[in-house]
Amino acid sequence: MKCSVYIATSVDGYIATPEGAVDWLHSAGNLETDMGDDLDMGFGSFIESVDCMVMGRKCMDMISSMNLSLEQWPYGDIHIAVLSNTVRTPPENLKGKVEMFSGKITDLVKTLESKGFKHAYIDGGSTITSFLNHRLIDEMIITRAPVLLGEGIPLFGKLDNQIRLVNSEAKAFANDFIQIKYRVNYL
Amino acid sequence: MKCSVYIATSVDGYIATPEGAVDWLHSAGNLETDMGDDLDMGFGSFIESVDCMVMGRKCMDMISSMNLSLEQWPYGDIHIAVLSNTVRTPPENLKGKVEMFSGKITDLVKTLESKGFKHAYIDGGSTITSFLNHRLIDEMIITRAPVLLGEGIPLFGKLDNQIRLVNSEAKAFANDFIQIKYRVNYL
């Protein structure tokens, strides 16, 4: 199963403020500009390419707190697995939308593969770092909002080893966001 | 005086390993590729555009430890000021090449301006963070080596305020390094 990251950070590499807020993301960049075909910065075609998603409990809580309507739900009908060894039941407003998983990441990946899933969207800083340490991430698409937060929750945590990235691509959007893309090359 | 940053980091935002090593920078990326006109990734034309440089004591020590020959010296004949409130004399191999400065950053900038300098190259993580907190950085060119270090000395330290960046540019080089450029927009 291919595992991909698609995530937004600040230029200093944070995915949220120390308190977990992401409002800076929506106010960052040039909001007046005409984005043309880049309005969703590739998120739509990325979501169409995946058939399942893995996130951590904190990521789930953040999404739950947004109280998204059916129209606002950004993940289509992809299968969503939430990693948690303590929480066994999803919040009320995510029931039927996510499935809790308790156990090892490698077992989750095997389970998803046995169900026929081919391409997973891996989300959340801790989850991405764990997947990297298990050498499971194949591709990363990181969209940097044009802002320095100065402190916050970093995308990347401590890694067991240095990891080489290849096939780099970069694009600056009209709103001053920059999207970079790499394949991961585990040695 | 215009103040610019030109610095290399890992994709997870580190300028050195926890021990201060930067050897990963020279082994990162596709070393076999033909870089064509991009061989120095813009460093030469950047250095030609500046007339002075400000770095911290740690940055000076790192350069001193490299024991560069005259031919290897990358900074041409630009004036180099080193910030330190404790060290008053440069290391033996940097004598005549750098000038120590003890005191406030704002006073250093005034001093450099009074000497007629127009464009300063600001180097080193702590120095860049201090300049940002003093709203003195105008432009940032960050070249990301295609590697995740997993831990290290971060480029950006804690900032007093969020800082907006504008006029983004991005370029992926053939060696898989990605260079991003921003102007800084203090509100």
Image: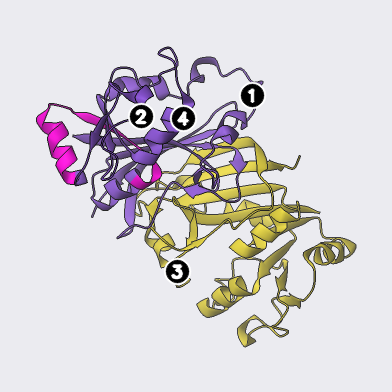
Chain colours: A yellow, B purple
The answer to whether B2 appears left or right of A10 in the picture is left
Real-space Cα separation, disc 2 to disc 1, in angstroms = 33 Å
- Are labels 2 and 1 assigned to the same chain? yes
- Are labels 3 and 2 assigned to the same chain? no
Give residue B76's position: percent from left, percent from top.
33, 17
Real-space Cα separation, disc 3 to disc 4, in angstroms = 37 Å
Q: Which numbered tag is attached to residue B65?
A: 4
The answer to whether B95 appears left or right of A68 in the picture is left
The C terminus of chain B appears in which quarter of the rendering? bottom left
Residue shown at 31% from the left, 30% from the top: B90
- The subunit carrying tag 4 is B
Residue shown at 45% from the left, 73% from the top: A19
Tags 3 and 1 touching, CB below 8 Å: no
* Residue for badge 1: B31
- Are labels 4 and 2 assigned to the same chain? yes
Q: Amino acid at mark 2?
A: Pro
Give residue A161's position: percent from left, percent from top.
69, 48
Residue A18 higher or lower than A10, as above or below: below
Q: Which numbered tag is attached to residue B91?
A: 2
Real-space Cα separation, disc 4 to disc 1, in angstroms = 24 Å
Real-space Cα separation, disc 3 to disc 1, in angstroms = 38 Å
Looking at marks 4 and 2 on the same chain, the residue that comes earlier in the sequence is marked by: 4
Provide the secondary structure element on which disc 1 rests. loop
Q: Residues within 10 Å of mark 1 (few under 14, many from 20)?
A: few
- The subunit carrying tag 2 is B
Question: From the viewer's perspective, is the residue at label 2 or at label 1 nearer?
Answer: 2
Q: Which numbered tag is attached to residue A18?
A: 3
Q: Residues within 10 Å of mark 2 (few under 14, many from 20)?
A: few
Range covered by the magenta-colored residues: B106-126
Real-space Cα separation, disc 3 to disc 2, in angstroms = 40 Å
The N terminus of chain B appears in which quarter of the rendering? top left
